[in-house]
Amino acid sequence: MAEFSAEIYQNEFLPDGGTDVHAIMSITCSGAGAAGEAEGDEAAEIVIVDTSGSMAGDKIVAAQRAAAVAVDQIRDGTWFAIIAGTDGADRAFPYPNAVAPMVRMEPGARAAARQAVSRLVAGGGTAIGSWLRLATQLFSTVPQATQRHAILLTDGKNQSETDEALQAGIRQAKGVFQCDCRGVGADWDVGELRGVAQALLGTVDLIPDPAAMERAFADLMQQAMGRGVAQAQLRVWAPQGAQVLFVRQVSPQVEDLTPRRSDLNALTSAFPTGAWGDETRDYHVAVRLAAKPIGAEQLAARVMLAVRDEVVAQGLVKALWSSDDTLTTRINPAVAHYTGQAELADAIQEGLAAKAAGDEATATTKLGRAVQLAEATGNEEATSRLRKVVDIDDAGTGTVRLKRGVDKLDEMALDTSSTKTTRVKK
Amino acid sequence: MSDPQAPPVEAAAAPATDAGPPGGSGPSSEASPPPHAAPPDDGAPPAAPPAVACPSCGTPTGSGERFCENCGVELTGAAPVAEEPDDPDAAPIELTRRRPPPGPPRAPGVVVDSPDLDLRPTTCGSCSGTIADDGYCTQCGTPAARPRDHFREEPADWVAAVCDKGIRHARNEDAVALAARPEPGSFAVLVVCDGVSSAPASDVASLAAARAARDVLAAPATSPPLTPEELLARSADAANAAATQVASTVQGPNPPSCTFVAALVDRDPDGAGVGTTAVVAWIGDSRAYWFPDAGPPVQLSTDDSWAAEAMAHGLSRAEAEKLPQAHAITRWLGADSPPGPPRTVVVDVSADGWLLVCSDGLWNYCSAPEDLGVLLATTAARVGPSPAPLAEALTAWANEQGGQDNISVALARCGGRPPG
């Protein structure tokens, strides 16, 4: 049985006239079990492989091997299918002439799927929106599957359809399944794929070399199979008259949850968080209250996690107005850390965007700030990725120089990993 | 958010009033007692009511008595004494029904009006929304009012106290406990204890201490009777024991501690016809003052504090109270308290006037008796001569000055005539 626990980190003391309350809520799930294991739950998986012309050669061979490995990881009983994506989308397994659009995994199906995968050929364009549409359609044939997830691999830009078509495909898929996206090589667009991942509650990452594909797919599918809680919903209650400034996931990735917001009632908003395995996720909530007199206390927010409409974890974010400077001027270390990490992610993305646009001055400033933040928050991974793109003169002041002749892959690696955060050092 | 774990008090619902058996003009609040034993159902004539042991003091009382001869508690549902039945063939003694254990015994006619501070409202005081299980309103987020943050005791119309959290502190570590007989100037107990905020659970300790002391002072007279000073020393012991017991439930280097001040007002205590006296005992820097309508105001207690020691060494009050360690107390109640009985002082309160017992949450803003006397008089002129609104008004005044500490104000209107 999955168990959830929650902790709040905040400074609840506001000065006279203070209005903004920040808190980090850390939620840990344990005992989640495997996907589809819990009573009433069934899982469904789709592997979407780019089989466009550019995949010919090493890449398609590696993709075949990676898809096979992914199929191996899928637990018996899980509904699954494989999609070959080009400027349209074809169902590679179950075979196009099969009666059932998706089948449950079992040894026979696994063997047949591996066969199908070995026959994937490269040729055609790239229209990710159509791949998403087909996946949405397939998932809709298994309404009993409470947990729906896909892995999507591409190697290039979405050239074969308009951006509207891509966005339409994303919109259809939203709320239907979660999708983890991977781009292999240097020819795909990080922003494009990030848009898919963000909307579909998934992650985006770079696979620099085809040889790394198998490992990436195995890890992704294993992780998906380890998520025994099909859906959890983050809920934020704020009192009458208060304004929720933002709700962000801050660990393991920075993700602004505002685009996912729906309203449960006048005071409570809800944010889907997808499936959970045994893991910890941290959220940053900021609420603006009307200032109250010194000595007053108010609950700024109730932050809850709900599974199947039942609240399984709750944290209280408090506000206490005080005239004691030693209390009101403190910043909670967790809040400070994650505020810095969020700023780091923004600085990296903005710096890279400026560089791509030819604005070297802005790029230098932003990436310099990123170096400074990475150093201050102890994010060594970010620092080492930044070093591939800039020469660091002084990390403390953020003085950097843009490198010449940066490997595109290094830039993309920095971009895709920009949202990865480190946890607060205790 | 935590509630002080108050020791069980006789009130189960707030506010409760209990009284000892009628003496003078005291009301009786108990229903008529049930039969002490069920009649035997074998058709034999009913046996005589058995002798019973008093549930309070254990003294066996002759059969048919309604009140204990020793301590005066009303005998209801008391346990029968195991005795040889006179008639070996008589039916065995049975209890009819269980009653909840009675509260601490009170001297005849003494009234106690202690609110249940553990009660939590379910409706928000700010917006009338519902209070959730987490203690906050589901609409506006205001925390449920904690009774301890502001409470009152009013055992008679001439004695009242208000106890308030103040503004700056997050919890109320002050406590008051009162008792009185209804007739003005006849008998009153006023106890104030101020918890030391650097020690955890001092709020639990101060409430337990104040109520324990009050219970000793409001108890029936012992045999042979004690002098007021001895009684006050005993009440301080009981308060100290209660505070020390709280220490056994908490961790930390500083055990829970509090101050103590108690005033015992009694008309004609020894039957010697000397008029009404007040005997005041104290440990720490909570104070008692006497403000006669006609006559100079007096601070009755002398703080056990650094500032008071400085004044004893010649500094003026103003200089002494500005010293950085001015408020460090040299005596207190609690697990590591310095031993010894409280200091006491006796004052004649037969004349018309106000007896004030208070914590430093009030006197820090108005320390000299002359200034406090003026404040009292002008406030009474504004809100009237009754102690309860006067105590509320003085508390509000202290909050207007900043409310830097918890505030306790206990007042007894002495003499025969109301002020003005």
Image: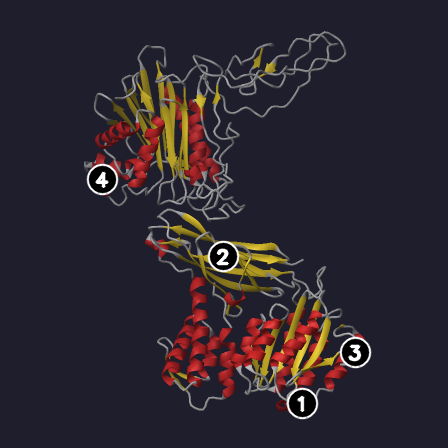
The chain letter for the residue carrying disc 3 is A
Q: How far apart are marks 3 and 4 (CA)?
A: 96 Å
Report the amino acid beneath label 4: Ala
Q: In which quarter of the image is residue A271?
A: bottom right
What residue would you read off at disc 4? B320
What residue would you read off at disc 1? A122
The chain letter for the residue carrying disc 4 is B
Q: Is residue B285 visible?
A: no
Q: Are marks 1 and 4 on the same chain?
A: no
- Is the residue marked by circle 1 packed among few (<14), some (14-19), or many (20+) residues within 10 Å? many
The chain letter for the residue carrying disc 1 is A
**Residue B374 % position (x, y):** 23, 30
Report the amino acid beneath label 2: Ile
What residue would you read off at disc 3? A98
What residue would you read off at disc 2? A8
Q: Is mark 4 on a helix, strand or loop?
A: helix
Q: Distance between the residues labelled 2 and 1?
A: 50 Å
